[in-house]
Amino acid sequence: MRKKIIFTMYTFVILTTSGIRAQLKPILVNEIISDAYLTPLINEKGFYWNIRIKSKVEKQFFLKNTEIRNNETYQILNSKVNLKLGENNLESEILDIKQFNWIFEDTDAQLLFSLTLENEQKKNSYILNIPVIIQQTELSDLRKSSALFLNVEEKIRPINVYYNFDGRRWSIVNHRNENNNIFYEFYPFPSIPQYSIELFQVFRYMYIENEKFNNAIKDKKLFFQQLISQPKSTCKGFKSKILREDKENLYFEYSVESCNGSKPASYFGRYLVSKKSTVLFIFIYFETEIPKLQKEIYQIGLEKQSNNY
């Protein structure tokens, strides 16, 4: 069954692909800032963000902080700030409730913020792109505060599971659970699934009461060779490369120019050997090469996936 699922992955055919919108690569440190956190707050004043910045310098800057959500941007803060060396606590403006509509969704909120610092002459800019994940326990507390302080309550909206790697929502489009093998497939806003130029797939292979089987799927290089065996033997222009390996992970890439008449495709993935299962995380880009920015975004996205499976 494991082999069947892998086969489904690399024979997925896209008949026509659409272009990708501009994305942001997560940037967590720069020459000025060594760390930054954003925390949502609701009290009698309204909705706002606490912004904690750990600065490497003591200097005045113009700071602009914006939430990036698909094709929309929401200004959080735009003001002059005096950063001191070390920890700085800032507060955003009081924001419209529409900017916090994700607290009434039934899945974890995954957000991306772009923070720009400019010096007084505005000659130099220092940028951070900060992912923020807010889990259901914190969302529940925010809903209670919204009702208590602002008398704002809304019905909880069911939302499909999604990722936010680059300012776009990658929504789930396929899911299967059969014979201890679990599969998820995601595509980015605003693509139509069957025409998307990008996909993200997750395959989880649960361990069973068969040590021989378990040892086989724990062998990372053996798994990779099985993964590429069919495209290597049947597809045109096949290329592959193991990028790096450690005790738990194997990072790799491979590409094909054409497979059974299909469009070209490039794969960029991570194979994880964890406590209860092994997991294949893989980005697919339907061209012979993945653009540099996309590859950087994919790499960060793969590295940020949990080891706890």
Image (spheres, rainbow, N blue to C red):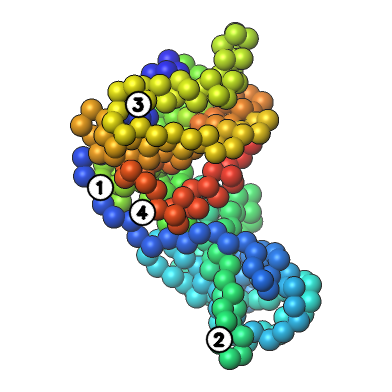
Residue visible at 51% across and 31% down? 280
For residue 16, say whether it is visible: yes
> What kind of element bears circle 4?
loop
Residue 242 sits above or below residue 4 on the image: below
Mark toward the start of the polypeptide (4 vs 3): 4
Q: Quick one: quadrant of the C terminus?
A: top right
Mark toward the start of the polypeptide (2 vs 3): 2
Q: Which amino acid does label 1 sit on?
A: Thr
Residue 162 percent across, percent down from the top left = 46, 47
Mark 1 lies on residue: 17
Mark 4 lies on residue: 189
Q: Which amino acid does label 4 sit on?
A: Phe
Does residue 152 appear left or right of residue 259 in this picture?
A: right
Front tag of 2 and 4: 2
For residue 146, say whether it is visible: no
Mark toward the start of the polypeptide (1 vs 3): 1
**Inter-mark Cα distance, 1 to 3:** 21 Å
